[in-house]
Image (cartoon, rainbow, N blue to C red):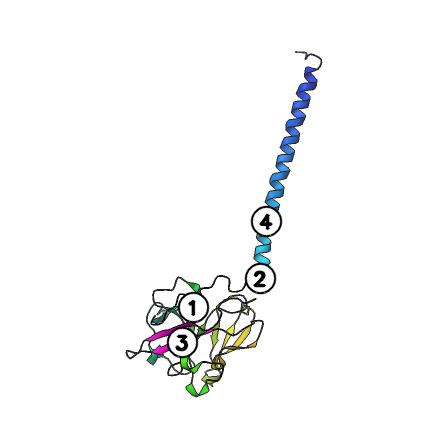
Amino acid sequence: MVNEPGKTTDNTDKQGITRRRFIIGTMIVAIIGAFGSLLSLLKVLSPSKKGSGYVSTIEPGDLLVYASGSNIGMEIKASSFNVGDAELVYPKGKSSNPANLVQLIKLNESDFKAPTDIQYTDKGFVAYSAICTHLGCTVSWVKNTGSPDASYTECFCHNSTFNPARGELVEGGPAPIPLAQIGVKVNDDDTLAFTSDFKGPIGPQV
Ligand code: FES
């Protein structure tokens, strides 16, 4: 069939317009996709914001339970600790909030020095936030078996070290502030309970 003069031109124009719209649409989708990927990349690369939403729900009277290991969820017993021991603990029934993660440590009472708040310790037990103040990794306990008093806290993400006898002051690495202390006491039945909320900011502080 032979097209009338002019009709061929109309079809060609319509096809051209359709093609242009398709190309423009594809470009828009590609640009939006690239922008989304860029935002995701920036989110991964950018450092954590101060606190990063870490809000503790620990209340005085909450019992301490193991946060890891074969005893996870069981109540801590004071008599099972020796000087130089430490455990990651949660307040009983509140383990779903990572801001509640605490490191419980036993030292010689005579070793405590400022800025450790002695009133927040009991029978050599002292407790601090277990969330590193650099970028929020969970800290670890480095036990010195030969000299338990020389044991210390370290964050292996970027090797920040903290002094537990001196209020977890930062002794090395990029952590900007100490790990916040929280009050603990030994109950008559050998369990331990919190006596306060954290005394300072918790979570990343950069
Ligand atoms: S997150 Fe702990 S040292 Fe960086």
Which residue is disc 2 drawn over? 47
Q: Nearer the viewer, residue 159 or 171?
A: 171
Mark 1 or mark 4: whose residue is earlier in sequence: 4
* Residue 104 percent coordinates (x, y): 41, 75
Q: Dot 4: what SS?
A: helix
* Residue 198 percent coordinates (x, y): 44, 72
Which residue is disc 3 drawn over? 183
Q: Which mark is residue 37?
A: 4
Mark 3 or mark 2: whose residue is earlier in sequence: 2
Q: Are marks 2 and 4 in contact (CB under 8 Å)?
A: no
The CA distance from mark 3 to mark 2 is 30 Å
Numbered disc in front, either 3 or 2: 3
Mark 1 or mark 3: whose residue is earlier in sequence: 1
The CA distance from mark 1 to mark 3 is 14 Å
Residue at 61%, 50% (x, y): give it: 38
Q: Which mark is residue 136?
A: none
Numbered disc in front, either 1 or 3: 3
Q: Is mark 1 within 8 Å of ligand 1?
A: no
Numbered disc in front, either 2 or 4: 2
* Residue 180 percent coordinates (x, y): 47, 73
Task: Name the outermost residue toward the left.
Answer: 189
Q: Are marks 2 and 1 in contact (CB under 8 Å)?
A: no
The CA distance from mark 3 to mark 4 is 45 Å
Question: Can residue 23 be seen from the camera position used here?
Answer: yes
* Residue 182 percent coordinates (x, y): 42, 74
Amino acid at dot 2: Pro
Amino acid at dot 3: Gly
Residue at 57%, 55% (x, y): give it: 43
Which residue is disc 1 drawn over? 101
Amino acid at dot 4: Ser
Amino acid at dot 1: Leu
Q: Indicate the quadrant containing the N terminus: top left, top right, bottom left or bottom right.
A: top right
